[in-house]
Amino acid sequence: MPLRLAVPKEIFPGERRVALDPSIAQRFSNMGVEVLVEKGAGEGAHFIDATYADNARLVDDAKTLYAEADVVFKVQPPTLEELDLMREGSVLVGFLKPHLHSDMVQKLCDKKITSFAMELVPRISRAQSMDALSSQASIAGYKVALMAAELASFFFPMLTTAAGTIRPAKVVVVGAGVAGLQAIATCKRLGAQVEAYDIRAAAKEQVESLGARLIDTGVSAEGVGGYARELTAEEKQTQAKVLAKHVAAASAVITTASLPGREAPKIITKDMVEAMKPGAVIVDLAAETGGNCEVTRPGETYEYENVTIHGPVNIPSLIPIHATEMYAKNLYNFLSPMIKEGQLQLDWEDEVIKESVLTCDGEIKHEPTGRRLRGAS
């Protein structure tokens, strides 16, 4: 019997992506995999059922889908109710956010489900095509730049008008990872003057290659795997003093700083916001994990001291077609090397498999998650 790969409809509120687009469904089908797609799964991303029909079997409901699945692809972490429907010993692949879902992790163990978290895929050269965090972050960085331009009370580009010349807006982008660099590039295309802040020294060349200037605060904090480490209290004070001057002069501030598996660092203080000019805007891409700004309200847009504070969540879902296509390619590049003659064969010596597994055979394989759950019990 061929391997059965199942794709359910996402039930997380506001989620428009689906874990597989029709072109990737065809590629799996060509490998001898039987693809099952729940009816209506792709509608939020504008992939209608008919586009899957040639390469996948459409299933009426989630219960039937999960009952047949050997491997399940998801975008959002499964609910406990979804896990109840999954077969014991099956395989789950998706964004799992284990630091937020202890009950889910425990149930994965209870049902002996082998789960792979896409956010745990190691950042090594061989795994670049599997890096779903980066693919979705690039979408988010592009979109937050457009949000900033829309919400700001200023033009982004320089304009020469009958009323005189309007100087370009000053934009400060906090965090120069994948999302931050995409935000920088998009703001530059819109004609703004862009400054960027990042505590990793390696970011300088990337920022300047996009035509922006890196704000030098005298603080460097290189971390593991391309991320920044958390700053000490003294380092936070040093960077805040320098950064505050640039924030005060900005028409728009875009924050993108994150720490994997942890709450977002607070970088923009209340005092910084109060010193900004009226009509300025802060778009906090990190709102979903607590926000980089002290006054961010996740999922809300409001005014604080004449400054617009925007805390968008689940941003990639706002561009669902390309977000789905990119994510589906990441999943294909992750899983396809494990499929031999239409069957799943896991090589536990493979670095990608070993690093990205969350649970297997009733055990938590991701040590930080295991330590956290043991400490909570």
Image: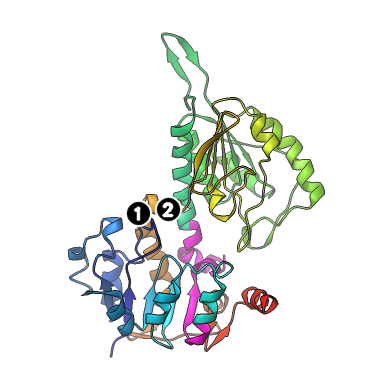
Mark-to-mark CA distance, 1 and 2: 7 Å
Residue 316 circle label? 2
Residue located at (78% from left, 43% from top): 237
Residue 113 included in the magenta stretch of the image: yes
Residue 100 in view (yes/no): yes
Amino acid at circle 1: Pro
Local crowd size for mark 2, using a 10 Å CA cut-off: few (<14), some (14–19), many (≥20): many
Residue 16 picture quarter: bottom left
The residue closer to the viewer here, 284 or 229, is: 284
Left-right relation of 320 to 347: left
Is residue 357 shown to the viewer in this render? no
Which region of the structure is painted magenta? 108-134
x then y, percent, for residue 262: 63, 61
Instruction: Tell me: residue 348, above or below residue 164.
Output: below
Q: Where is residue 32 in the image (x, y as percent from the top left)?
A: 28, 81
| Of 84 and 209, the residue lying toward us | 84
Residue found 62% across the figure and 74% down from its top: 369
Question: Label 1: how many residues lie within 10 Å, few (<14), some (14-19) or many (20+)?
Answer: many
Q: Mark 1 points at which residue?
A: 320
In the shown orientation, is residue 312 left or right of residue 273?
left
